[in-house]
Image (tube, rainbow, N blue to C red):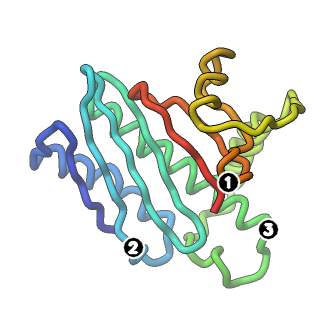
Amino acid sequence: MNFTVRGQQIDVTDALREYVEKKFSRLEKYFDAPPTTDGSVTLSTTRGLSTVEVTIPLPGVLLRAEDRSEDMYASIDAVADKLERQIRKHKTKLNRKFRQEGGLKSLFVEQPAAEVEVLEAVEDEQSDELEVVRTKRFLLKPMDVEEAILQMNMIGHNFFVFSNIENQEINVVYKRNDGKYGLIEQE
């Protein structure tokens, strides 16, 4: 699997590039054939924090992970672990969903039965964390983006769902880590 490594506000040294390639090459053991698409790795530093973002487009699924810490190498390790968990979780879902051969299941390598049982036990514990514990219902008042941002800031949340008065669609505004705002629209 090939990775495109680029830096934002940081020079990507050969040692850093080699470390990234070494860490993410361990993901190849989960695939029958190496994916033909290239992964993207972005390394950046902001306010003393090192951020690593990785995106791996695969047929039918997009793997993405991000980590931020004071140490670039620790962030790379954490992202590699997150991606490995995502792959195992996705593989477990596919194995449960598609018991027949073919489809996306053939993308991943079969593991020994003992290892699969241990991984499924871990995944079952993690899947309990996805339980919906609260449901809220509210009336969507038509408003423009600026009013939605003001409403979001007023209630102290980091996102706000609203009916956009300009296009009569449901949109979401959110506060980004850099302090600016983002807008999510329907396609």
Residue 40 at what x, y percent from top left? 34, 58
Horizontally, residue 115 falls left or right of residue 76, namely right
Q: Nearer the viewer, mark 3 or mark 2?
A: 2
Q: Residue at x 45, y 78 (%)?
A: 33
Q: Which residue is mark 2?
A: 37
Mark drawn on residue 167: 1
Tell me the residue at 30%/67% (across/down): 2
Q: Mark 2 or 1 closer to N-term?
A: 2
CA distance separating discs 3 and 1:
38 Å
**Helix, strand or loop under label 1:** loop
Q: In this view of the protein, which residue sits in the foreground, 11 or 89?
A: 11
Query: In the image, is residue 5 above or below residue 75?
Result: below
Name the side, left or right, on which 24 lies relative to 84.
Answer: left
In the displayed structure, 179 sits above or below 22; it is above
Q: Are marks 3 and 2 in contact (CB under 8 Å)?
A: no
Which image quarter is the N terminus in?
bottom left
Numbered label attached to residue 97: 3
Q: Position of residue 91 (x, y in %)?
A: 64, 62
The residue shown at (26%, 49%) is 20
Q: Residues within 10 Å of mark 3 (few under 14, many from 20)?
A: few
What residue occupies the far front of the structure in this picture?
A: 166
SS for callout 2:
loop
Give above or below for 102 relative to 109. below
Q: Is there a contact, CB below 8 Å, between mark 3 and mark 1?
A: no
* Label 1: how many Cα within 10 Å (few below 14, some 14–19, many 20+): few
Q: Residues within 10 Å of mark 2 (few under 14, many from 20)?
A: few
